[in-house]
């Protein structure tokens, strides 16, 4: 028994002191627990009747692809069939298509990409905090990672959505800029701009970070060009496919309901989670305004989502990518020894609730 305990202690010490292995361990635990409680929940509670699940109803993991999730798989399989799909950016479907040649399953390919990117996102989340000086070099990355994986809407990091891919690319780009390694940044900006419509937020963020570091103007121009070219390439495709370069915008407004309401809709339809996330965005902006202005402005960009759409569709999910919020929560509560476990416990409860709601198809954004 003592030998077993010592072996376990040594293994855990190794994992806990190596960011890469720790990131893999955390991701596997999160994925495993998400699948376990989601599958068990769906055995007991009937799924939401109007929820759109992945077409492979026989798959035991089909509940991890509902609402917008199956749309990325449909694009990977059939391409952009109608204007409805034009608001879904192409990088994730392209990756799904590529991996499906090996796995022979679009659903499993999508999940494998999301789960692999989750490992990378956790890794660079920890690395960025170390580089910012918020986490000591030899300290465990487990504590800060908890604020990422237990964020209220973090279930989308494990589902067939773009969130884990977006987080991985964004945090990698931020890390490289902090390390003043600018070579790959334009390529990452190209990729982020064809991952999600909010990729433009990241392009501006990285430009601001380069300006803060007093980088040479040519590096800022290259970075902006990378993001611009990515968007132009997608718009050129849409022009050829739908005879409309702005089809992604028209799809969002005319098909998916953005801008169809007046601004009173934001007051009438606001939820407690919406309010909480808005408060966190403002708090992060205030927290970083003097410390790192680029982080503050980037956080505020996410308030444009409900203001532009005049509704909260997607807002809760998109705010997951406002990573200065998670940085702020870790930095603040890590020093509050008494409050820290209670905050994590509350986050875990909310996270569990959203996992169960998502698995049953009751929420998709």
Image: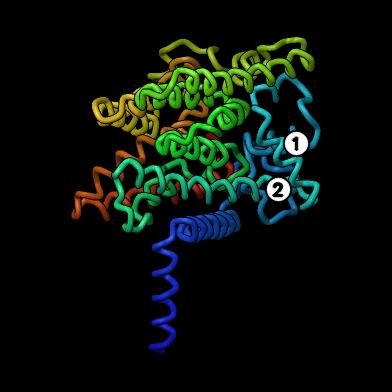
| Depicted 62 relative to depicted 324: above or below | below
Labelled disc at residue 265: none
Question: Residue 136, can we see it?
Answer: yes
Work out whether residue 177 or residue 273 is closer to the camera in this orientation and state it: 177
Give the total number of marks visible in the rendering. Answer: 2
| Depicted 187 relative to depicted 62: above or below | above
Question: Is 9 placed left or right of 74 in the picture?
Answer: left
Residue in the image at 58% along x and 25% along y: 193
Callout 1 touching callout 2 (CB < 8 Å): yes
Question: Is 120 placed left or right of 92 in the picture?
Answer: left
Question: Residue 269, can we see it?
Answer: no
Residue 189, image x, y percentages: 56, 28
Label 1 or label 2, whichever comes before in sequence order: 1
Residue in the image at 72% along x and 54% along y: 59
Work out whether residue 218 or residue 106 is closer to the camera in this orientation and state it: 218
Q: How is the image coloured?
A: rainbow
Work out whether residue 31 or residue 21 is closer to the camera in this orientation and state it: 21
Question: Is 53 placed left or right of 11 in the picture?
Answer: right
Residue 177, image x, y percentages: 44, 33
Work out whether residue 203 or residue 268 is closer to the camera in this orientation and state it: 203
Residue 67, image x, y percentages: 62, 36
Residue 22, image x, y percentages: 45, 59
Labelled disc at residue 109: 2
- Callout 2: 10 Å neighbours few (<14), some, many (20+)? many
- SS at badge 2: helix
- SS at badge 1: helix
Q: Quadrant of the N terminus?
A: bottom left
Labelled disc at residue 76: 1
- Residue 69: name its quadrant: top right
Q: Disc 1 to disc 2, how far (Cα)?
A: 10 Å
- Residue 152: name its quadrant: top left
């Amino acid at each position: 028994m003592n030998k077993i305990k010592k072996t376990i202690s040594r293994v855990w010490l190794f994992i806990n002191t190596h960011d890469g292995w720790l990131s893999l361990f955390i991701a596997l635990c999160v994925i495993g627990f998400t699948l376990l409680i989601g599958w068990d929940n769906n055995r007991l509670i009937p799924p939401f009747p109007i929820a759109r699940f992945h077409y492979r109803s026989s798959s035991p993991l089909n509940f991890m692809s509902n609402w917008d999730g199956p749309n990325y798989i449909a694009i990977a399989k059939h391409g952009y069939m109608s204007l409805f799909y034009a608001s879904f950016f192409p990088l994730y479907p392209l990756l799904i298509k590529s991996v499906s040649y090996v796995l022979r399953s679009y659903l499993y390919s999508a999940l494998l990409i999301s789960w692999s990117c989750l490992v990378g996102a956790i890794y660079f989340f920890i690395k960025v905090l170390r580089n910012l000086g918020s986490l000591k070099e030899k300290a465990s990355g487990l504590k800060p990672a908890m604020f990422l994986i237990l964020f209220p809407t973090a279930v989308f990091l494990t589902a067939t959505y773009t969130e884990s891919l977006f987080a991985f690319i964004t945090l990698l780009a931020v890390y490289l800029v902090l390390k003043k390694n600018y070579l790959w940044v334009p390529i990452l900006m190209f990729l982020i701009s064809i991952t999600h419509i909010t990729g433009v937020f990241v392009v501006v963020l990285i430009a601001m970070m380069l300006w803060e570091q007093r980088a040479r103007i040519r590096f800022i121009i290259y970075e902006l060009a990378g993001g611009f070219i990515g968007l132009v390439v997608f718009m050129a495709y849409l022009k050829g496919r739908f005879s409309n370069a702005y089809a992604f915008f028209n799809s969002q407004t005319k098909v998916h309901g953005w801008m169809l309401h007046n601004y009173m809709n934001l007051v009438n339809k606001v939820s407690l989670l919406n309010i909480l996330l808005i408060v966190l965005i403002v708090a992060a902006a205030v927290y970083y305004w003097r410390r790192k202005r680029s982080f503050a402005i980037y956080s505020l960009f996410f308030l444009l989502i409900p203001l532009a759409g005049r509704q909260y569709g997607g807002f809760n999910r998109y705010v997951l990518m406002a990573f200065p919020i998670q940085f702020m929560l870790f930095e603040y509560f890590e020093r509050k020894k008494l409050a820290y476990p209670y905050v994590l416990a509350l986050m875990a409860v909310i996270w569990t609730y959203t996992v169960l709601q998502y698995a049953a198809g009751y929420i998709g954004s």
